[in-house]
């Protein structure tokens, strides 16, 4: 079952695809995205096998609630305001640490799926290239050209797996 509906996509993407074909594109893009960011929705568990004593753990996507077990015991740990970090507070980890959590970014994932569908639908709907005599036209981003499609797909993944940073850190370039 898809996370994003045909109606949600039609509201934002102009395409001549039938509902059945559009649903196929949605499912294909959701499968592609799930390969890169993990399951799109639902609970999951992350296990940290050998934690440092006072390590702060980073979740790959934000969570609103996380249940933490340390060495088989349920413990209280702080979840950061942005939902990306689990802080042990004043205690030390024993290990292994299991964090049960559910991503709280469904709207961001839906937006990403819609952008991927837009890229996929445009690749199907629009003219990729044509040649008339000595004139040749090739769409920027069309298959075989040095286009922006892979970068655009990568930027969708990056927007979902955005790099949350610890407070007061500076990125040097």
Image (tube, rainbow, N blue to C red):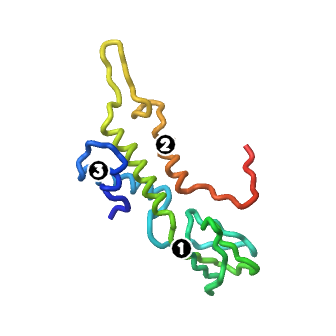
User: In front: 10, or 59?
Assistant: 10
* Residue shown at 30% from the left, 43% from the top: 15
Q: State the image coordinates of residue 29 (x, y, percent, origin top left).
A: 38, 52
What is the secondary structure assignment of the residue under circle 3?
Answer: helix
Query: In the image, is 18 to the left or to the right of 162?
Result: left
Which residue, given by chain and number where applicable, does mark 3 sit on?
22
Badge 1: how crowded within 10 Å, few (<14), some, or many (20+)? many
What is the secondary structure assignment of the residue under circle 2?
Answer: helix
Which residue, given by chain and number where applicable, does mark 2 sit on?
152
Q: State the image coordinates of residue 139 (x, y, percent, origin top left).
A: 40, 29
Q: Quadrant of the C terminus?
A: top right
What distance separates the C-alpha of mark 2 from that of mark 3? 20 Å
Q: Quadrant of the N terminus?
A: bottom left
* Residue shown at 48% from the left, 36% from the top: 148
Q: State the image coordinates of residue 36 (x, y, percent, origin top left).
A: 49, 55
Q: Tell me if residue 4 comes above or below residue 17 in the rendering.
A: below
Q: Earlier in the sequence, mark 1 or mark 2?
A: 1
What distance separates the C-alpha of mark 1 from that of mark 2? 29 Å
Query: In the image, is 87 to the left or to the right of 67?
Result: right
Q: Which mark is residue 49?
A: none
Q: Tell me if residue 16 comes above or below residue 114 in the rendering.
A: above
Query: Of all residues shown, which one is farthest toward the bottom?
Result: 73
Query: In the image, is 38 to the left or to the right of 142?
Result: right
Query: In the image, is 52 to the left or to the right of 30?
Result: right
Which residue, given by chain and number where applicable, does mark 1 sit on?
101
Q: Earlier in the sequence, mark 2 or mark 3?
A: 3
What is the secondary structure assignment of the residue under circle 1?
Answer: strand
What distance separates the C-alpha of mark 3 from that of mark 1? 32 Å
Badge 3: how crowded within 10 Å, few (<14), some, or many (20+)? many
């Amino acid at each position: 079952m898809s996370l994003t509906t045909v109606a949600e996509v039609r509201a934002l993407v102009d395409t001549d695809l039938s509902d059945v074909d559009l649903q196929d594109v949605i499912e294909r893009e959701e499968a592609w995205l799930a390969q890169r960011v993990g399951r799109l929705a639902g609970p999951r568990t992350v296990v940290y096998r050998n934690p440092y004593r006072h390590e702060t753990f980073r979740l790959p996507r934000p969570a609103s609630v996380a249940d933490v077990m340390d060495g088989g015991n349920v413990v209280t740990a702080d979840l950061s305001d942005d939902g990306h970090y689990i802080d042990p507070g004043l205690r030390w980890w024993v290990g292994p640490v299991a964090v049960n959590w559910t991503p709280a970014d469904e709207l961001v994932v839906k937006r990403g799926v819609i952008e991927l569908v837009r890229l996929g639908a445009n690749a199907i709907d629009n003219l990729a290239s044509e040649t008339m005599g000595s004139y040749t036209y090739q769409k920027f981003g069309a298959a075989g050209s040095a286009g922006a499609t892979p970068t655009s797909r990568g930027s969708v993944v990056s927007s979902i797996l955005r790099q949350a940073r610890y407070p007061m850190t500076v990125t040097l370039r």
